[in-house]
Image (spheres, grey):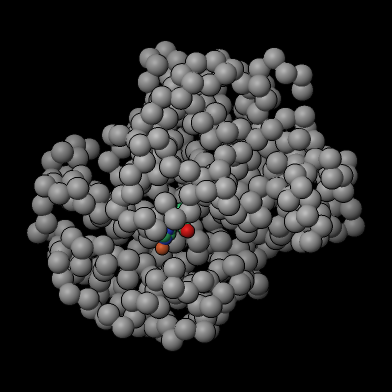
Amino acid sequence: ADTTDPAVLRELIAGELAAARERTGRLTDCVEDDELVAQHSPLMSPLVWDLAHIGNQEELWLLRNVGGRDPMHPEIDPLYDAFEHPRAERPSLPLLPPKEARGYAHDVRGRVLDLLAASPLEGSPLLDAGFAFGMIVQHEQQHDETMLITHQLRKGPAALTAPAPPDHADRLPAEVLVPAGPFSMGTDTEPWALDNERPAHRVELPAYWLDTAPVSNAAYQVFIADGGYDDPRWWTERGWAHRQQAGLSAPLFWSLDGGQWMRRRFGTLEPVPPREPVLHVSWYEADAYARWAGRRLPTEAEWEKAARHDPATGRSRRFPWGDESPTPAHANLGQQHLQPAPVGSYPAGQSPYGVRQLIGDVWEWTSSDFHGYPGFRVWPYKEYSEVFFGPEYKVLRGGSFAVAPVACRGTFRNWDYPVRRQIFSGFRTARYAGEET
Ligand code: AVJ
Ligand code: FE
Protein backbone atom coordinates (compact mmCIF):
# COMPACT_ATOMS: atom_id res chain seq x y z
CA ALA A 1 0.00 0.00 0.00
CA ASP A 2 1.23 3.50 -0.89
CA THR A 3 0.92 5.20 2.49
CA THR A 4 2.21 8.49 1.09
CA ASP A 5 -1.25 8.80 -0.51
CA PRO A 6 -3.43 10.29 2.29
CA ALA A 7 -6.53 8.43 1.11
CA VAL A 8 -4.69 5.10 1.32
CA LEU A 9 -3.26 5.99 4.73
CA ARG A 10 -6.71 7.01 6.03
CA GLU A 11 -8.16 3.71 4.91
CA LEU A 12 -5.30 1.79 6.52
CA ILE A 13 -5.78 3.65 9.82
CA ALA A 14 -9.55 3.13 9.76
CA GLY A 15 -9.01 -0.60 9.14
CA GLU A 16 -6.55 -0.89 12.04
CA LEU A 17 -8.86 1.05 14.38
CA ALA A 18 -11.73 -1.28 13.45
CA ALA A 19 -9.60 -4.43 13.88
CA ALA A 20 -8.47 -3.34 17.35
CA ARG A 21 -12.05 -2.59 18.40
CA GLU A 22 -13.31 -5.89 17.02
CA ARG A 23 -10.72 -7.66 19.18
CA THR A 24 -11.60 -5.55 22.24
CA GLY A 25 -15.22 -6.58 21.66
CA ARG A 26 -14.31 -10.27 21.47
CA LEU A 27 -12.42 -10.02 24.77
CA THR A 28 -15.18 -8.20 26.62
CA ASP A 29 -18.41 -9.57 25.08
CA CYS A 30 -17.69 -13.22 25.94
CA VAL A 31 -18.16 -12.88 29.70
CA GLU A 32 -21.03 -11.61 31.86
CA ASP A 33 -20.97 -8.13 33.43
CA ASP A 34 -20.05 -9.48 36.88
CA GLU A 35 -16.87 -10.94 35.33
CA LEU A 36 -16.07 -7.65 33.61
CA VAL A 37 -16.08 -5.75 36.89
CA ALA A 38 -14.38 -8.51 38.92
CA GLN A 39 -10.68 -8.52 39.60
CA HIS A 40 -9.38 -11.91 38.51
CA SER A 41 -5.86 -11.28 39.88
CA PRO A 42 -4.33 -8.43 41.90
CA LEU A 43 -1.81 -8.17 39.03
CA MET A 44 -4.53 -7.17 36.59
CA SER A 45 -7.23 -4.53 36.20
CA PRO A 46 -10.89 -5.48 35.92
CA LEU A 47 -11.61 -5.89 32.18
CA VAL A 48 -14.03 -2.97 32.37
CA TRP A 49 -11.14 -0.70 33.42
CA ASP A 50 -9.10 -1.61 30.32
CA LEU A 51 -12.17 -0.98 28.18
CA ALA A 52 -12.77 2.58 29.38
CA HIS A 53 -9.02 3.30 29.61
CA ILE A 54 -8.75 2.45 25.90
CA GLY A 55 -11.48 4.99 25.16
CA ASN A 56 -9.97 7.58 27.50
CA GLN A 57 -6.48 7.40 25.93
CA GLU A 58 -8.08 7.67 22.50
CA GLU A 59 -10.03 10.74 23.59
CA LEU A 60 -6.94 12.34 25.16
CA TRP A 61 -4.56 11.84 22.26
CA LEU A 62 -6.83 12.08 19.24
CA LEU A 63 -9.83 14.23 20.17
CA ARG A 64 -8.06 16.61 22.58
CA ASN A 65 -4.39 16.74 21.54
CA VAL A 66 -4.82 16.30 17.79
CA GLY A 67 -8.37 17.62 17.36
CA GLY A 68 -8.29 20.39 19.99
CA ARG A 69 -11.67 19.30 21.41
CA ASP A 70 -12.76 19.82 25.01
CA PRO A 71 -12.82 16.86 27.41
CA MET A 72 -16.03 14.80 27.15
CA HIS A 73 -16.11 13.74 30.83
CA PRO A 74 -13.18 15.42 32.63
CA GLU A 75 -14.28 13.93 35.97
CA ILE A 76 -13.43 10.38 34.82
CA ASP A 77 -9.87 11.17 33.64
CA PRO A 78 -8.16 10.42 36.99
CA LEU A 79 -9.91 7.02 37.22
CA TYR A 80 -8.26 5.86 34.01
CA ASP A 81 -4.83 7.37 34.58
CA ALA A 82 -2.62 4.30 35.07
CA PHE A 83 -0.20 6.30 37.21
CA GLU A 84 -2.81 7.55 39.67
CA HIS A 85 -4.16 4.17 40.64
CA PRO A 86 -2.15 0.92 40.71
CA ARG A 87 -3.94 -2.14 39.31
CA ALA A 88 -4.71 -3.62 42.77
CA GLU A 89 -6.69 -0.47 43.61
CA ARG A 90 -8.78 -0.24 40.44
CA PRO A 91 -11.73 -2.49 41.39
CA SER A 92 -12.59 -0.21 44.34
CA LEU A 93 -12.81 2.92 42.13
CA PRO A 94 -16.18 4.30 40.96
CA LEU A 95 -15.51 2.98 37.43
CA LEU A 96 -17.98 3.33 34.57
CA PRO A 97 -20.18 0.20 34.59
CA PRO A 98 -19.89 -2.11 31.52
CA LYS A 99 -22.69 -0.49 29.50
CA GLU A 100 -21.38 3.03 30.12
CA ALA A 101 -17.76 1.99 29.47
CA ARG A 102 -18.76 0.49 26.11
CA GLY A 103 -20.86 3.54 25.29
CA TYR A 104 -18.01 5.93 26.12
CA ALA A 105 -15.45 4.04 23.99
CA HIS A 106 -18.02 3.91 21.17
CA ASP A 107 -18.76 7.67 21.34
CA VAL A 108 -15.08 8.51 21.30
CA ARG A 109 -14.56 6.26 18.29
CA GLY A 110 -17.37 7.89 16.31
CA ARG A 111 -15.79 11.32 16.79
CA VAL A 112 -12.33 9.95 15.97
CA LEU A 113 -13.56 8.65 12.63
CA ASP A 114 -14.93 12.12 11.85
CA LEU A 115 -11.59 13.63 12.84
CA LEU A 116 -9.69 11.13 10.69
CA ALA A 117 -11.78 12.04 7.64
CA ALA A 118 -11.09 15.76 8.12
CA SER A 119 -7.54 15.74 9.47
CA PRO A 120 -4.37 16.21 7.40
CA LEU A 121 -1.87 13.42 8.01
CA GLU A 122 1.20 15.62 7.87
CA GLY A 123 2.39 19.05 8.97
CA SER A 124 3.05 18.31 12.64
CA PRO A 125 5.03 15.54 14.35
CA LEU A 126 1.89 14.03 15.91
CA LEU A 127 0.12 13.93 12.54
CA ASP A 128 2.99 12.93 10.25
CA ALA A 129 2.30 9.48 8.75
CA GLY A 130 -0.73 9.36 11.06
CA PHE A 131 1.57 8.75 14.06
CA ALA A 132 -0.96 9.63 16.80
CA PHE A 133 -3.55 7.32 15.21
CA GLY A 134 -0.92 4.56 14.96
CA MET A 135 0.06 5.04 18.58
CA ILE A 136 -3.57 4.71 19.68
CA VAL A 137 -4.13 1.61 17.55
CA GLN A 138 -1.06 0.02 19.16
CA HIS A 139 -2.23 1.13 22.61
CA GLU A 140 -5.58 -0.61 22.18
CA GLN A 141 -3.92 -3.78 20.86
CA GLN A 142 -1.48 -3.76 23.81
CA HIS A 143 -4.40 -3.58 26.22
CA ASP A 144 -6.07 -6.38 24.28
CA GLU A 145 -3.03 -8.53 25.08
CA THR A 146 -3.32 -7.39 28.72
CA MET A 147 -6.99 -8.45 28.70
CA LEU A 148 -6.03 -11.81 27.22
CA ILE A 149 -3.63 -12.27 30.17
CA THR A 150 -6.60 -11.53 32.46
CA HIS A 151 -8.58 -14.23 30.64
CA GLN A 152 -5.75 -16.71 31.22
CA LEU A 153 -5.78 -15.87 34.96
CA ARG A 154 -9.55 -16.11 35.20
CA LYS A 155 -11.04 -19.24 36.80
CA GLY A 156 -13.89 -21.28 35.32
CA PRO A 157 -14.61 -22.75 31.90
CA ALA A 158 -13.11 -21.28 28.73
CA ALA A 159 -14.67 -18.07 27.43
CA LEU A 160 -12.39 -17.93 24.39
CA THR A 161 -11.41 -20.63 21.93
CA ALA A 162 -9.19 -20.73 18.85
CA PRO A 163 -7.72 -23.42 16.60
CA ALA A 164 -4.25 -24.81 17.38
CA PRO A 165 -1.46 -23.20 15.35
CA PRO A 166 -0.23 -25.06 12.28
CA ASP A 167 2.32 -27.78 13.08
CA HIS A 168 5.00 -27.58 10.42
CA ALA A 169 8.05 -27.79 12.65
CA ASP A 170 11.35 -28.83 11.10
CA ARG A 171 14.22 -30.61 12.80
CA LEU A 172 16.94 -27.99 12.89
CA PRO A 173 20.42 -27.51 14.33
CA ALA A 174 20.07 -26.44 17.97
CA GLU A 175 21.91 -23.14 17.48
CA VAL A 176 23.18 -20.81 14.78
CA LEU A 177 26.39 -18.77 14.64
CA VAL A 178 26.11 -15.02 14.26
CA PRO A 179 29.57 -13.78 13.20
CA ALA A 180 31.21 -10.76 14.83
CA GLY A 181 30.50 -7.37 13.33
CA PRO A 182 28.42 -4.24 13.49
CA PHE A 183 24.72 -3.86 12.75
CA SER A 184 22.13 -1.09 12.88
CA MET A 185 19.89 -1.34 15.97
CA GLY A 186 16.66 0.63 16.40
CA THR A 187 14.98 2.78 13.75
CA ASP A 188 14.66 6.28 12.28
CA THR A 189 12.30 5.24 9.50
CA GLU A 190 9.57 3.02 10.97
CA PRO A 191 6.66 5.51 10.96
CA TRP A 192 4.76 4.15 13.96
CA ALA A 193 7.79 3.13 16.04
CA LEU A 194 7.53 4.27 19.66
CA ASP A 195 10.15 6.49 21.29
CA ASN A 196 12.15 3.68 22.91
CA GLU A 197 12.82 2.08 19.47
CA ARG A 198 14.60 5.25 18.26
CA PRO A 199 17.10 6.37 17.05
CA ALA A 200 18.89 3.89 14.80
CA HIS A 201 22.47 3.43 16.01
CA ARG A 202 25.42 1.23 15.17
CA VAL A 203 26.25 -1.60 17.58
CA GLU A 204 29.36 -3.76 17.30
CA LEU A 205 29.00 -7.33 18.63
CA PRO A 206 31.46 -10.19 19.08
CA ALA A 207 30.47 -13.55 17.52
CA TYR A 208 27.84 -15.57 19.38
CA TRP A 209 25.69 -18.66 19.08
CA LEU A 210 21.94 -18.30 19.48
CA ASP A 211 19.26 -20.98 19.88
CA THR A 212 17.52 -21.60 16.56
CA ALA A 213 14.14 -21.64 18.33
CA PRO A 214 12.79 -20.80 21.78
CA VAL A 215 13.44 -23.28 24.62
CA SER A 216 10.80 -26.04 24.58
CA ASN A 217 8.70 -27.47 27.40
CA ALA A 218 10.58 -30.79 26.97
CA ALA A 219 13.94 -29.08 27.51
CA TYR A 220 12.57 -27.10 30.42
CA GLN A 221 11.24 -30.28 32.04
CA VAL A 222 14.79 -31.70 32.00
CA PHE A 223 15.88 -28.65 34.01
CA ILE A 224 13.07 -29.30 36.50
CA ALA A 225 13.82 -33.04 36.71
CA ASP A 226 17.51 -32.30 37.22
CA GLY A 227 16.65 -30.31 40.36
CA GLY A 228 17.18 -26.93 38.72
CA TYR A 229 14.67 -25.26 41.02
CA ASP A 230 16.52 -26.59 44.10
CA ASP A 231 20.07 -25.64 43.21
CA PRO A 232 21.09 -22.08 44.12
CA ARG A 233 24.14 -22.37 41.81
CA TRP A 234 21.94 -21.59 38.80
CA TRP A 235 20.14 -18.61 40.29
CA THR A 236 21.17 -15.02 40.89
CA GLU A 237 21.03 -13.97 44.53
CA ARG A 238 17.77 -12.09 43.98
CA GLY A 239 16.42 -14.86 41.82
CA TRP A 240 17.08 -17.47 44.49
CA ALA A 241 15.49 -15.27 47.18
CA HIS A 242 12.43 -14.90 44.96
CA ARG A 243 12.32 -18.62 44.13
CA GLN A 244 12.34 -19.37 47.90
CA GLN A 245 9.85 -16.71 48.91
CA ALA A 246 7.38 -17.42 46.07
CA GLY A 247 7.85 -21.20 46.32
CA LEU A 248 8.54 -21.59 42.58
CA SER A 249 8.86 -25.15 41.28
CA ALA A 250 7.58 -24.97 37.67
CA PRO A 251 6.19 -22.39 35.22
CA LEU A 252 2.99 -20.60 36.20
CA PHE A 253 -0.18 -22.62 35.45
CA TRP A 254 1.68 -25.96 35.65
CA SER A 255 0.67 -28.75 38.07
CA LEU A 256 1.74 -32.35 38.58
CA ASP A 257 -0.83 -35.10 38.14
CA GLY A 258 0.62 -38.50 39.02
CA GLY A 259 4.00 -37.78 37.48
CA GLN A 260 2.56 -35.98 34.42
CA TRP A 261 2.98 -32.23 34.11
CA MET A 262 -0.31 -30.55 33.24
CA ARG A 263 -0.95 -26.93 32.34
CA ARG A 264 -4.04 -24.78 32.62
CA ARG A 265 -4.66 -22.80 29.45
CA PHE A 266 -7.70 -20.54 29.01
CA GLY A 267 -9.98 -22.71 31.12
CA THR A 268 -8.75 -26.16 30.05
CA LEU A 269 -6.34 -28.52 31.78
CA GLU A 270 -4.11 -30.46 29.39
CA PRO A 271 -0.78 -32.32 29.41
CA VAL A 272 2.17 -29.98 28.88
CA PRO A 273 2.94 -30.23 25.14
CA PRO A 274 6.64 -31.14 24.92
CA ARG A 275 7.40 -29.45 21.58
CA GLU A 276 5.84 -26.10 22.43
CA PRO A 277 8.01 -23.20 23.66
CA VAL A 278 7.95 -22.89 27.43
CA LEU A 279 5.53 -20.15 28.48
CA HIS A 280 4.83 -18.21 31.69
CA VAL A 281 8.32 -18.16 33.12
CA SER A 282 9.89 -15.23 34.98
CA TRP A 283 13.22 -13.69 34.02
CA TYR A 284 14.73 -15.37 37.07
CA GLU A 285 13.62 -18.81 35.87
CA ALA A 286 14.81 -18.16 32.31
CA ASP A 287 18.17 -16.95 33.58
CA ALA A 288 18.54 -19.99 35.89
CA TYR A 289 17.70 -22.41 33.07
CA ALA A 290 20.32 -20.76 30.84
CA ARG A 291 23.03 -21.10 33.48
CA TRP A 292 22.06 -24.71 34.18
CA ALA A 293 22.43 -25.34 30.43
CA GLY A 294 25.92 -23.77 30.48
CA ARG A 295 24.62 -20.80 28.52
CA ARG A 296 23.14 -17.33 29.11
CA LEU A 297 20.25 -15.17 28.00
CA PRO A 298 21.03 -13.11 24.88
CA THR A 299 21.37 -9.36 25.19
CA GLU A 300 18.66 -7.44 23.37
CA ALA A 301 21.27 -6.31 20.82
CA GLU A 302 22.08 -9.97 20.11
CA TRP A 303 18.38 -10.72 19.75
CA GLU A 304 17.87 -7.81 17.34
CA LYS A 305 20.94 -8.53 15.22
CA ALA A 306 19.77 -12.13 14.76
CA ALA A 307 16.28 -10.87 13.89
CA ARG A 308 17.11 -7.96 11.56
CA HIS A 309 20.66 -7.93 10.23
CA ASP A 310 21.01 -9.02 6.62
CA PRO A 311 24.65 -10.03 6.11
CA ALA A 312 24.24 -9.89 2.32
CA THR A 313 23.37 -6.19 2.26
CA GLY A 314 24.58 -5.02 5.66
CA ARG A 315 21.22 -3.38 6.37
CA SER A 316 18.62 -4.11 9.03
CA ARG A 317 15.24 -5.48 7.99
CA ARG A 318 11.87 -4.60 9.52
CA PHE A 319 11.22 -8.27 10.24
CA PRO A 320 13.37 -11.45 10.15
CA TRP A 321 11.91 -12.44 6.76
CA GLY A 322 12.21 -9.01 5.13
CA ASP A 323 10.32 -5.74 5.05
CA GLU A 324 6.80 -7.05 4.28
CA SER A 325 4.22 -6.90 7.05
CA PRO A 326 3.53 -10.21 8.80
CA THR A 327 1.14 -12.77 7.27
CA PRO A 328 -0.07 -15.97 8.98
CA ALA A 329 2.70 -17.84 7.12
CA HIS A 330 5.42 -15.74 8.77
CA ALA A 331 4.50 -15.77 12.44
CA ASN A 332 2.01 -16.71 15.12
CA LEU A 333 0.57 -13.29 15.94
CA GLY A 334 -2.74 -11.56 16.59
CA GLN A 335 -4.52 -14.03 18.89
CA GLN A 336 -5.27 -16.27 15.90
CA HIS A 337 -4.21 -19.14 18.16
CA LEU A 338 -4.24 -19.25 21.95
CA GLN A 339 -0.86 -20.94 22.29
CA PRO A 340 2.61 -20.88 20.70
CA ALA A 341 3.45 -23.20 17.79
CA PRO A 342 5.90 -26.13 18.19
CA VAL A 343 9.57 -25.10 18.21
CA GLY A 344 11.02 -25.06 14.70
CA SER A 345 7.79 -23.84 13.07
CA TYR A 346 7.31 -20.95 10.62
CA PRO A 347 10.02 -21.65 8.02
CA ALA A 348 8.79 -18.63 6.00
CA GLY A 349 9.48 -16.41 8.99
CA GLN A 350 13.11 -17.30 9.57
CA SER A 351 15.89 -14.69 9.59
CA PRO A 352 18.87 -14.62 7.19
CA TYR A 353 20.88 -16.52 9.83
CA GLY A 354 18.18 -19.21 9.93
CA VAL A 355 16.75 -18.29 13.34
CA ARG A 356 13.07 -19.25 13.78
CA GLN A 357 10.10 -17.81 15.68
CA LEU A 358 11.78 -14.56 16.65
CA ILE A 359 8.52 -12.77 15.95
CA GLY A 360 5.33 -14.13 17.55
CA ASP A 361 4.73 -17.26 19.66
CA VAL A 362 6.34 -16.12 22.96
CA TRP A 363 7.87 -12.91 24.28
CA GLU A 364 11.56 -13.61 24.81
CA TRP A 365 13.38 -12.45 27.93
CA THR A 366 16.77 -10.86 27.27
CA SER A 367 19.59 -10.18 29.73
CA SER A 368 19.25 -6.42 29.15
CA ASP A 369 17.87 -3.77 31.50
CA PHE A 370 15.44 -1.30 29.91
CA HIS A 371 17.27 1.90 28.90
CA GLY A 372 16.95 4.59 26.24
CA TYR A 373 19.19 4.21 23.20
CA PRO A 374 21.99 6.75 22.68
CA GLY A 375 20.23 9.94 21.53
CA PHE A 376 16.85 8.89 23.02
CA ARG A 377 14.20 11.61 23.03
CA VAL A 378 10.85 11.37 24.86
CA TRP A 379 8.08 11.14 22.29
CA PRO A 380 5.32 12.03 22.76
CA TYR A 381 5.03 11.46 26.55
CA LYS A 382 7.51 10.37 29.17
CA GLU A 383 5.09 7.91 30.78
CA TYR A 384 5.22 5.61 27.77
CA SER A 385 8.89 4.61 28.22
CA GLU A 386 11.19 6.97 30.03
CA VAL A 387 9.73 6.62 33.52
CA PHE A 388 10.51 2.88 33.32
CA PHE A 389 14.16 3.19 32.30
CA GLY A 390 16.58 1.69 34.82
CA PRO A 391 17.73 -1.60 36.33
CA GLU A 392 14.29 -2.60 37.67
CA TYR A 393 12.95 -3.76 34.31
CA LYS A 394 14.21 -6.40 31.88
CA VAL A 395 13.59 -6.17 28.14
CA LEU A 396 11.49 -8.75 26.28
CA ARG A 397 11.58 -9.03 22.49
CA GLY A 398 9.66 -10.48 19.58
CA GLY A 399 6.05 -10.52 20.69
CA SER A 400 3.75 -13.41 21.59
CA PHE A 401 0.80 -15.10 19.89
CA ALA A 402 -1.26 -12.38 21.61
CA VAL A 403 0.51 -9.45 19.91
CA ALA A 404 -1.15 -7.79 16.92
CA PRO A 405 0.99 -7.39 13.78
CA VAL A 406 0.52 -3.60 13.99
CA ALA A 407 2.15 -3.60 17.44
CA CYS A 408 5.06 -5.83 16.44
CA ARG A 409 8.30 -5.40 14.47
CA GLY A 410 11.97 -6.26 14.76
CA THR A 411 12.66 -3.06 16.71
CA PHE A 412 9.74 -3.35 19.17
CA ARG A 413 10.71 -3.42 22.86
CA ASN A 414 8.65 -4.66 25.79
CA TRP A 415 9.73 -4.64 29.43
CA ASP A 416 8.65 -6.03 32.77
CA TYR A 417 9.85 -6.87 36.28
CA PRO A 418 12.03 -10.00 36.46
CA VAL A 419 9.48 -11.71 38.75
CA ARG A 420 6.60 -11.41 36.27
CA ARG A 421 5.28 -14.54 34.59
CA GLN A 422 1.57 -14.09 34.01
CA ILE A 423 2.70 -12.47 30.74
CA PHE A 424 3.19 -14.64 27.64
CA SER A 425 6.91 -14.98 28.30
CA GLY A 426 9.46 -17.57 27.20
CA PHE A 427 13.09 -17.31 26.12
CA ARG A 428 15.96 -18.66 24.06
CA THR A 429 19.61 -18.92 25.13
CA ALA A 430 23.00 -17.84 23.74
CA ARG A 431 26.73 -18.26 24.30
CA TYR A 432 29.83 -16.46 23.06
CA ALA A 433 31.46 -18.19 20.11
CA GLY A 434 34.44 -20.22 21.19
CA GLU A 435 33.07 -21.05 24.62
CA GLU A 436 32.43 -24.65 25.54
CA THR A 437 28.79 -25.60 26.08
C1 AVJ B 1 4.73 -1.67 26.74
C2 AVJ B 1 3.32 -3.46 27.36
C3 AVJ B 1 4.81 -2.48 28.98
O1 AVJ B 1 1.02 -2.53 28.97
O2 AVJ B 1 2.21 -1.55 30.48
C4 AVJ B 1 -0.20 0.40 27.73
C5 AVJ B 1 2.06 -0.65 27.11
N1 AVJ B 1 1.53 1.68 27.94
N2 AVJ B 1 -0.62 1.59 28.18
C6 AVJ B 1 1.94 -1.80 29.31
C7 AVJ B 1 1.15 0.45 27.59
C8 AVJ B 1 0.43 2.38 28.32
C9 AVJ B 1 2.88 -1.20 28.26
N3 AVJ B 1 3.91 -2.19 27.82
FE1 FE C 1 -2.61 2.11 28.69
User: Is 50 located above or below residue 319 in the figure?
Assistant: below
Q: Quadrant of ligand 2?
A: bottom left
User: Is 414 located above or below residue 409 in the figure?
Assistant: below
Q: What percent of the width, then of the height, locates residue 189?
A: 28, 34
Number of dots carrying numbers:
0
Q: Nearer the viewer, residue 218 or 431?
A: 431
Residue at the bottom extreme? 94
User: Is 319 located above or below residue 363 in the figure?
Assistant: above
Q: What percent of the width, then of the height, locates residue 47?
A: 48, 72
Q: Quadrant of residue 165?
A: top right
Residue drawn at x 42%, y 30% as measured from the top left: 185
Asked if residue 40 lies left or right of residue 57, the reply is right
Residue drawn at x 61%, y 38% as measured from the top left: 367
Q: Nearer the viewer, residue 221 or 121?
A: 121
Q: What percent of the width, then of the height, locates residue 305?
A: 49, 26
**Can the viewer see residue 381 in this picture?**
yes
Asked if residue 229 lies left or right of residue 39, the reply is right
**Can the viewer see residue 271 in this picture?**
no
Residue drawn at x 70%, y 48% as measured from the top left: 284
Q: Quadrant of residue 296?
A: top right
Asked if residue 57 lies left or right of residue 180, the reply is left
Q: Quadrant of residue 219?
A: top right
Q: Quadrant of the C terminus?
A: top right
Q: Quadrant of the N terminus?
A: top left
Q: What percent of the width, then of the height, locates residue 146?
A: 50, 61
Q: Nearer the viewer, residue 85 or 281?
A: 85
Residue drawn at x 40%, y 35% as measured from the top left: 374
